[in-house]
Amino acid sequence: MTQATVNPAALTPEQMAQLLAAAGGRAITEEAIREDIAGGAPANADGTMSLIDYTAWLARESGGG
């Protein structure tokens, strides 16, 4: 069985939603991630996202940092 390599510095919104949903145990959709990008969440020029940058942005937005 082949396992895909995931770059945490360049996740698509779909990958980000899947990863955060699996880690957090609650539903997170690709649409919600795209809405965050439209609302100012950091994204790379190619539309991918850094897991670290995005989680830091979420913490700031929620008043946690």
Image (cartoon, rainbow, N blue to C red):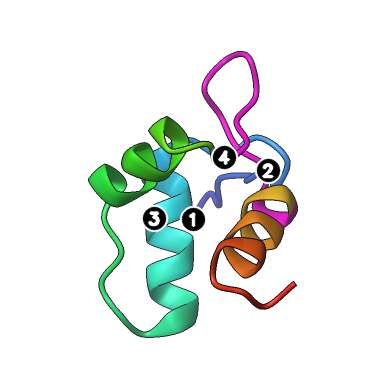
Q: In the image shown, does 65 or 49 lie closer to the viewer?
A: 65
Between discs 1 and 4, the one toward the N terminus:
1
Between discs 3 and 4, the one toward the N terminus:
4
Classified by dominant secondary structure, the portion drawn in magenta counts as: loop
Between discs 4 and 2, the one toward the N terminus:
4
* Amino acid residing under circle 3: Ala
Question: Disc 4 designates what residue?
Answer: 11
Whether the magenta-drawn stretch holds residue 4 is answered as no
Between discs 3 and 1, the one toward the N terminus:
1
Answer yes or no: do the residues labelled 1 and 4 have beta carbons within 8 Å? no
As measured in the structure, the alpha-carbon distance from the residue carrying label 3 to the one carrying label 4 is 9 Å
Q: Residue furthest top?
A: 45
Question: Disc 1 designates what residue?
Answer: 1
- Badge number at residue 50: 2
Instruction: Identify the residue at image location x=54%, y=71%.
Output: 62
* Amino acid residing under circle 1: Met
Q: Position of residue 21 (x, y in %)?
A: 38, 70
Front tag of 1 and 4:
4
As measured in the structure, the alpha-carbon distance from the residue carrying label 2 to the one carrying label 1 is 27 Å
Where is the C terminus found, in terms of image quarters?
bottom right
Question: Disc 3 designates what residue?
Answer: 17
Element type at mark 3: helix
Answer yes or no: do the residues labelled 3 and 1 have beta carbons within 8 Å? no
Span of residues in magenta: 41-52
Element type at mark 2: loop
Answer yes or no: do the residues labelled 4 and 2 have beta carbons within 8 Å? yes
